[in-house]
Amino acid sequence: MDQQEYGRYLLAMGGEEFEPEEEEQVSEEHLYGFFQWFMPVGAGVERVFEPIPSGDRFLDRIRPIYEMLNPEDFTGEYVPGYFNGGQGTASEEMLRRLGEDLIKGLKSLFSIVPEDDEAAEIAKEALQDLACVKEVVVLPQGELGKLEQRAIQGTNEEDSDAVYEALGDLLRSRSDYDEAIEILSEAYYSIACDYWVAYYLQWPRYKGLQEAENCLYPYFELYRYGYNLHWTKTTLFIGKR
């Protein structure tokens, strides 16, 4: 099944109103919000991955996003539009450990890139940046937003997007944009409007990185607990979204 056939197969799950015209090309944008169709418990989501290679691996990845939802939130007139974490509780110790595990996982990921690889320089720079991160700090409620606002205003010289950029560059270099699963890229992003959540859920598609498939698991866990990150050159901050 090629990308266009797969896209039409997916849109058909929504009924006639979602089916494209006969000559219309299906794009990633057609499927923005697609996984929300299966809220709150994920009933029927297994059909999404039946036609593609490694479909069971993609299915295993996505099931937990439905498990974190509260079905009671879907009984009223208004229902959530995104998969918002925060239902569970986590101790400060657990949050700090997840942050430390994330740093270790990212180091392991960038360490497996061969020296003769096109992404070798990216990986080397990322490892250098991660080596400078010496501390994980869990912030009180509301403090993360203040850090992010200062970052937007450019008033904190210690803010760093280096790890985000390196990860995105590496995964793009390991993606086949012609394979069927690519048509779901916007659907994955629209789960939480968070690239790292989308990266984690799509991991089986990244060529040659299977041994690091759980490097973003700590990030996904933080997201499920309702937390976000802010990086500086020396510190990883964790706070409520």
Image: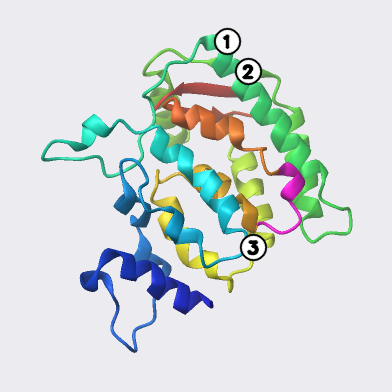
Contact check, label 1 and label 2, Cβ < 8 Å = yes
Q: Is 75 positioned to the left or the right of 8 in the image?
A: left
Disc 3 marks which amino acid? Answer: Ser
CA gap between label 2 and label 3 equals 30 Å
CA gap between label 1 and label 2 equals 6 Å
Residue 212: quarter of image: top right
Q: Which residue in the structure is indicated by mark 3?
A: 175
Mark closer to the chain start, 3 or 1: 1
Q: Residue 79 versus residue 153: which sits nearer the camera?
A: 79
Vertical side of 153 occupied by 144: above or below: above
Secondary element at tag 3? loop
Disc 1 marks which amino acid? Answer: Glu
Tell me the number on the disc at residue 97: 2
Whether the magenta-drawn stretch holds residue 211 is answered as: yes
Q: Which residue in the structure is indicated by mark 1?
A: 93
Q: Is 89 positioned to the left or the right of 167 in the image?
A: left
Which region shows up in magenta?
206-212
Mark closer to the chain start, 2 or 3: 2
CA gap between label 3 and label 1 equals 35 Å
Residue 12: quarter of image: bottom left
Could you say where residue 191 lies in the image, as x and y percent from the top left?
Answer: 39, 47
